[in-house]
Image: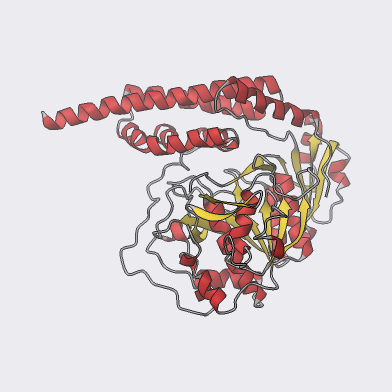
Amino acid sequence: MPSESPTRRTVLRTAAAGAAATGFAGTALAEPTGRTLVGLQPGSDASVATTQAESVHRELDFGDIGRVVAGTFSDNAISALQNNPNVRYVEKEGRMHALAQDVPYGIDIVEADVAHDNGETGAGADIAIVDTGIDQDHPDLQANLGNGADFTGTGSWDDDNGHGTHCAGIANADDNTEGVVGVSTEATLHGVKVLGSGGGGNFSDIAAGVEWVANQGYDVASLSLGGSTGSSALQDACQYATNNGVLVVAAAGNDGECSNCVSYPAAYDTVMAVSATDENDEIASFSSTGPEIDIAAPGAGVYSTYNNGGYTSLDGTSMACPHVAGAAGQLMANGHSNADARQQLQNTADDICRCPEDMGAGRLNVAAALGLQSPSNCNGTVNCQNDGGGGGGCFITTATAGEGPTLDSLRRFRDESMAATPVGRGMVGLYYRISPPIADTLERHPESLTTRATRKIVDVCASLSDRQDETDSAVESASLGVSLTALYMVGITVGAGGHLGIRTRELLDRTA
């Protein structure tokens, strides 16, 4: 389904991002689409919204759930639509990003090799990788490739990023004696390109990709993507796909260590949410956790296919998700429905002695799901590695401002601006490593000068993030992004300096 030509607002956003990256090292600005998503009541014609639109980006039809129109609307039109009884919701369009980290395991821990040895290959199943596309020339994927579709406007579902190709190999790389082998090895892969070369994609484009998967009658949709805020349109799409027999699997997010911080769309109850483990069956430090988690799978340093016929190791819940998608493909190849497959995967998972918020039902066991062995039980103490908060990784913000709008604003800056470039992701990674002890000190000393000063900086950053999210000016967006990143670093520096001073005084008091 082709997209319309970029609007002036889209061009401004893109220009703003480039200007900010030039103006301050490591800065990349959010690129909100400037569009609005209008959800219509079942039976309502799309013209309810299209006749009010300045331009229409795409129309989605979710059958009995209703229609969605994505487009640009004047303020007066939005006000009228909000009061129209044929309209279920009117919401701002946003973007989601590939959930991976450039940090360098194998596939045997989920017992997929046992499944292969017993002739279970997933042949006959259709697995859609809803991501950045798939490298159509990769020697480890070519034999398993089926159809594809592009929803980004590039005109091709070929991968121009590498993330989708990496996920495709985990789910279903060919068992051809070279490269790597997938959880399934003979299912049919379909590339659904909803994320661009930078790893970001619009809510409506992702929803359109999920809708397409459902309309093709495919078995599994693997979504290694997400964001800290949801979209009613994407929620509708996931419900529509589930109603049409698709098992939708999604990455939980990379906001750990944290509790109750699962990303969307994984947080929707129609979606199977996957957290990440490492080679020692520990919950990966970066993995988001929370009550929505259904199952865990390997996600730390996973080696798989990559663009240009290559291979690499990546780290993230993005890598955990296709492990489960590949296993679901094997079950559905054997006649399981989407609901049956989801339940079977949970019923046969290995208990790795983690609380349900961390691992859901347990860590994936493909052979057990296929009835080839019994799942393992916990023989030790149950731990919650990510217990104790952390606010989705925004440790200092949570310690000084708590949960609420301020934390949400800073998360948005992190997800939409900092996470848009490798340099930005590197800065966020550094922050995650150094900030937990700082946050702990600030939380223990809420009335200290350092804590009060850091809180003021956090509040200003949240205000700037809100302004950046609302502006339609590329120049203002770039300027705000530069200021935000600089102030962000000042806040960390102030907090770190105060932390060292407080800890020094505490140690001296103990030795006095």
Residue 201: x and y in percent read: 68, 43
Q: Is residue 21 above or below residue 243?
A: above
Residue sitting at the far front: 178
Q: Quadrant of residue 199?
A: top right
Side of 301 relative to 167 (left or right): left
Q: Is residue 44 above or below residue 324?
A: above
Answer whether residue 291 is visible to the viewer in this image: no
Q: Is residue 227 above or below residue 240?
A: above
Side of 165 relative to 430 (left or right): right
Side of 41 relative to 504 (left or right): right
Residue 203: x and y in percent read: 70, 45
Residue 145: x and y in percent read: 72, 62
Answer whether residue 352 is visible to the viewer in this image: yes
Residue 309: x and y in percent read: 65, 52
Q: 59 or 15: nearer the eye?
A: 15
Total labels: the figure holds: 0
Q: Quadrant of residue 36?
A: top right
- Location of the C terminus by quadrant is top left
Residue at x 44%, y 35% (from the top left corner): 430
Q: Is residue 335 above or below residue 170?
A: below
Residue at x 80%, y 32% (from the top left corner): 7
